[in-house]
Amino acid sequence: MTPQSQEKITVVVTKTKDNPNPVIHTATVSAPTNIACIKYWGKANSHYNTPINDSLSLTLDQSDLRAVTTASASLSFDTDRLWLNGSEELGSATSKRFRACVDGVRALATDKVDPDTNQVIVSKDSWKGMNVHIASYNTFPTAAGLASSAAGYAALVAALVQLYGAKESYPGEFTAIARQGSGSACRSLYGGFVAWRAGGTKSDWSDSIAEQVADESHWEEVRAVILVVSDAKKETSSTAGMSNSVATSELLAHRAKEVVPKRMKTIEEAIKAKDFESFGKVTMMDSNQFHATCLDTYPPIFYMNDVSNSVVQMVHKYNDWAGEIRAAYTFDAGPNAVLYTLDKHVVELLALVLKYYPAESNDLVGNYVNNGSMAKEALEFELDSSLIAAVEKTGRVHAHGDVKMVYCTKGGPGPKTLDASCEIFDFKIE
């Protein structure tokens, strides 16, 4: 399991004759991941990193799944530097995505004012002369299909906004900057259910922004059970996969033009009405079609595996047995399953998961499921024998090892500002 905190990164800042008392400005934030219900796949404009269709996601609670980022600026920094999960990423600070976020937010900087004296500490123009040091870490597997890049770039933009005291020149501008880092990062800047509007009516794509459909308090009963089938880096990156799909899949073009607009309308209405039956059905159908476009790509892309497919079968058997949709699966660009359900069914669903995707032993379930008390409740829950019989017909065997970790979580808010104790850097001035 990925640690919830990061060891401090020590950086030596040298005093000079011109700058005998270096000043370092810092801001630290955490940002959530989000899991799409209506998928984004395919770029309309690669330069601005805009999508060929709208998408919609649920921002997840940050208790277990989040990115934490410290952004620092100083006249004493010789160059821009970036650390990810404790290791410096040489050359990354000059990458197009990183520069789009740093330069984009810095252009919106304001004066930094002392709250006690009202004196300007840093003028907005002075920020331009300072290099930045950025450090970030994830509390969940990177590049394994759990939207780690969305959390990471959302945290980067949110930390820079705090650092520079940036102000938007139009609503949603920060999300337009974040999507230039990672497309789905724009949705992680808001809590609850969030839509990313494709845009395209403006030449600079400034209308390709995220909008909150409903905040995290609107439908609090929604839960997510996440099955980490693999925590390894995926074989085909999302960027490469999208490019191949746009170039070769006729199904993808039809999906973007004809299918997604109708599904966006359906799911937004379902969310506002708290209609889980409709929400669950369209979520599963869209996941299936997204992966169908991956198979329609030439050569085909396989993000799901046999374990993923067995989860799909289990969920359908569960819903058929219940006579209603109680669980809805969705898979991003990876094999990991996200199962949406309601609070009243989450223990039953987790009990089903633990029966067919068990921990190595019940004694170790506390290390296997992030929520120990819910895991204990699920282990004690007695599943209906007819449900077990229905799932058994899929041929699923009770084997541990197919799932590496299970997270039980829910919707949550957007980025949070953290105090100085959470800063990742330990600057030593010598």
Image (cartoon, rainbow, N blue to C red):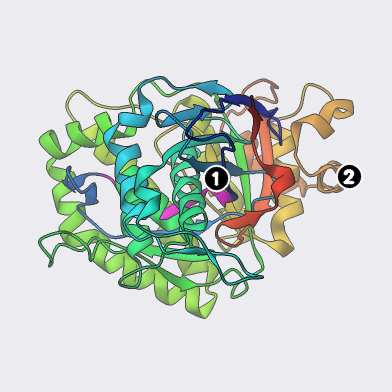
Question: Whole-Å distance between the Cαs marked 2 and 1?
Answer: 23 Å
Secondary structure category for the residue under label 2: helix
Is disc 1 surrounded by few (<14), some (14 to 19) or many (20+) residues within 10 Å?
many
Q: Residue at x 71, y 55 (%)?
A: 346
Residue 268 appears in the picture as rendered = yes
- x, y percent for residue 113: 54, 65
Residue 404 appears in the picture as rendered = no
- x, y percent for residue 242: 24, 37
Q: Is residue 34 magenta?
A: yes
Along the line of sight, the residue nearer the viewer: 398 or 37:
37
- x, y percent for residue 2: 67, 29
The disc at residue 380 is 2
> Is residue 107 depicted above or below 388 in this figure?
below
Q: Main secondary structure of the magenta part?
A: strand
Q: Residue at x 75, y 40 (%)?
A: 370
Q: Which residue type carries mark 1?
A: Val
> Is residue 9 depicted above or below 391 in this figure?
above
**Image position of 395 (left or right of 103):** right
Mark with earlier residue (2, 1): 1
Dot in front, 2 or 1: 1
**Image position of 425 (left or right of 298):** right
Per the rendered image, the range of residues in magenta is 30-41
Quadrant of image for the N terminus? top right
Q: Residue at x 60, y 34 (%)?
A: 140
- x, y percent for residue 263: 32, 65
> Is residue 261 depicted above or below 427 in this figure?
below
**Image position of 335 (left or right of 385):** left
Secondary structure category for the residue under label 1: strand
Is disc 2 surrounded by few (<14), some (14 to 19) or many (20+) residues within 10 Å?
few
Q: Is residue 397 magenta?
A: no
What residue is pinned by disc 1? 338
Q: Which residue type carries mark 2?
A: Glu
